[in-house]
Structures are given as C-alpha cells and as structure tokens.
Image: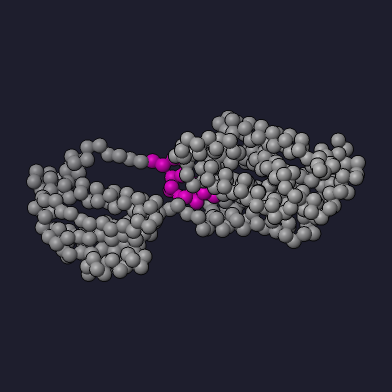
Amino acid sequence: MNVQRVVAVAYKEWREIVRDRLFFSLAFVVPAVLMLLFGYGLSLDVENIPFAVVDYDHSAQSRDYAYRFIDSRYFDFKGYVRDERELGGLLAQSRVRAAIVIPEHFGQRLQAGRGAQVQTLVDGTFPFRALTTKGYVTAINASANQETIAQLLARAKGVPVQTAREAVQPVRLEVRYLYNQSVKSIWSLAPKLLMVILMISPPFLTALGVVREKESGSIFNIYSSTVTRGEFLCGKLAPYVAISALNILALWLLATLLFAVPFKGGFLFFMAASLIYVICTTGIGLMVSVLVRTQVAAMIVTAIVTVIPAVLYSGVLIPIPSLGPSAQAIAHLLPAMYYTNIVVGCFLKGVGLAALWPDVLILAAYAAVLFTVGFTMFHKRPVS
C-alpha cells in the first residue's frame, strides 16, 4: 500500500467535504444539532403532572390528604373543582391528567377508625405516564394511611406518635439509587444519544461520499488510475473517521457541560472505544455504498439499517432484557447494544476496560468483518 496515494485520496475527499455545503453540514453541524434536539426534546421523567381535586368533605382531614399531593414535586396542582362534571371537562381538554375525588364524611370516617374510599382519575392516553402516575398516587396514599393508623394507635394506646409509627411500620424500606442518584432521565439518555448519533452520522457520510462518485462518474478516474482498491478505500474513509472522532469530542462536551451528565470513567478508554465504534459504523456505510448506485438509495438504505437498530434494539428506550426473545437476538447481532454498554459504563458507572472488554472486543470484530466484506465486494472495475 502506497501511503502517498492514500494521503492524496484522503486530501481530495477532505476538499470535497469542505467545499460541499451539504456534506460540511452533515459532517460538522448535524451531529451537534441532533444532540441538542434529542437532549432537550426527549425525556422519560414523569413530573409536574397537572392534577385537580374534588373535595366534597371540606374537612381538615380532607385538606391534609389533598396537600400530600399538592406538596409533591410529581404533581402540578391546578386547583379545586366543584364536581366530577367540571372535572370531566378538564380531563377531556387535557388541562389536567389526574384528579383526586374525596367523598363526603371523609374526615368523620377516619376519626372513627373506619375506611374511606377516595377516587383517583388518571388520563390513560399515555400508558407509561398513566402507570407511573398510578404508582405516585399509590405511594402517597400508603404514606397517608400509615400516618392515620399511627395517630389512631397513639391515641388509643396513649403512646407517642413516633412510637406508634414504628409499631405500624416495623420494617422500613430505604431505597438507594446507584449511579444515577437523582434518577434523571437525561443522565441516562445523553450518553445513549452519542450511540444513536454516531450510529447514524458516519454511515451517511461514508455511503453518500462513495456513491456520489459513482453518480458523478468521477470514480472512473479511480478505475483508470494506479490506485488500488485498498488505497482508495483507506483514503476515502479516513476523513470520515477523523471527522467522527471530532464529533465524539463535541458530543461528549455537550453531554457533560450542557446536560451536566457526570463522566466517571477513563477518558482515553472512552475515546478509544468510541473510535472503534465509529470505524464499525463507517464500515456499515461502506457496505451500503457497494450495494447501491444512487445517493437517494444510499440515504434510504442507510436510514433503515442505522436508525431502527439504534433506537429499538440498543436499550435506549427499552432495556434489552425487557425485549422478547427474537428482539433480544437481533439486538445481540447489532453493534449498537455493545456501545450502549460502553457509554453507560463510562459515564455513569465509572468502569473501564476490565469490565467492558467483551463489548470492545465484539465491536472490533464487527468492524473487521464489515471492512473485510466491504473490501471484498468493492471492485475497481464495475461489475456488469
């Protein structure tokens, strides 16, 4: 392999990227824009749920019960309403997503040690949000029940309320969240967005770059030259790998500085593993480029083979163990899942090569196979 010829091809490709506004935007602007759009627009946090209260009792106990929801950071109190008819209008207009209906004689029944039924209405148009809302309501209601029982027991036995609380709750459950103590969805999503963007951007650039030469006919200059296919492919793909390496750094800065995601792992290991992943995804673009002849076809095929795996089979939205057996098998055949393990491990868990070497090894093998197949399928003479 002649290094000078590789450098000459790479320099020519670099000039094409800089000169073409579309390619320049795809290379340097689109990855950062995608990070900003997804980072600000995608959230799995269920907080500030708009809710209202119908209080038919108007007692101290009913107000105390309602304030347990009003004071919660998970709910955004929109006010008291008179009855269910008015409440139905608010729910239909999506002005509230949940409601608490406190019946008459609520306080009297509690004072008498009798049970009271409180109705909860939850907008079910978003099932995930509805189920999470139900969990919040159940937890707050359980806390209210424990406090009521403790007060009744303290009054009946003549013991301090704190003693009664310990009696009604002999086993206390303390939950400690590891790696993401605040359970912020952006801390989990931002590292995974690196995986998504680096799965999409390098293949698009590579596929379009090679296919563009086919469409314009300039690739015939390569066919008639002394440049070997290995030199052509190395020189052609090197600028895209270098640009993607810069994008890794830019996306890392956006994740850590703009979205304040902690980075606990080794930076050099992260960059090295990310570079292997970029080489792997560039190989996907190479595969696409040898299979299609037009840029439109290249964009369609690249979108299909990158976007769907990056979103559905990588663990971005749904954990891999929660997928069905067939979906899990597909996820294990694609590189996105392995790089997701790497970015999550580097950003949140602070682990390195000792824990993530299997994922790095699989990505390296994946990249080697893709480039070997792409090199074999690429011919300096067009196949008739």
Whole-percent x and y of residue 264?
A: 55, 41
Q: Is residue 179 magenta?
A: yes
Residue nearer the viewer, 174 or 97 = 97
Residue nearer the viewer, 128 or 376 = 376
Q: Is residue 325 magenta?
A: no
Check the picture and name the quadrant holding the C terminus. top right
Whole-percent x and y of residue 185?
A: 47, 50
Question: Can see residue 375?
Answer: yes
Task: Write the residue at 62% across / 32% down.
Answer: 362
Residue nearer the viewer, 272 or 221 = 221
Is residue 152 rendered to the left or right of residue 65? left
Task: Write the residue at 61% across / 48% down.
Answer: 304
Task: Write the residue at 88% across / 41% down.
Answer: 227
Task: Write the residue at 27% across / 39% down.
Answer: 172
In the rendered view, would you say 241 is above or below 90? above
Is residue 320 rendered to the left or right of residue 229? left
Whole-percent x and y of residue 309?
A: 57, 44
Which region of the structure is painted magenta? 176-191
Quadrant in the picture for residue 51: bottom left
Question: Can see residue 242?
Answer: no
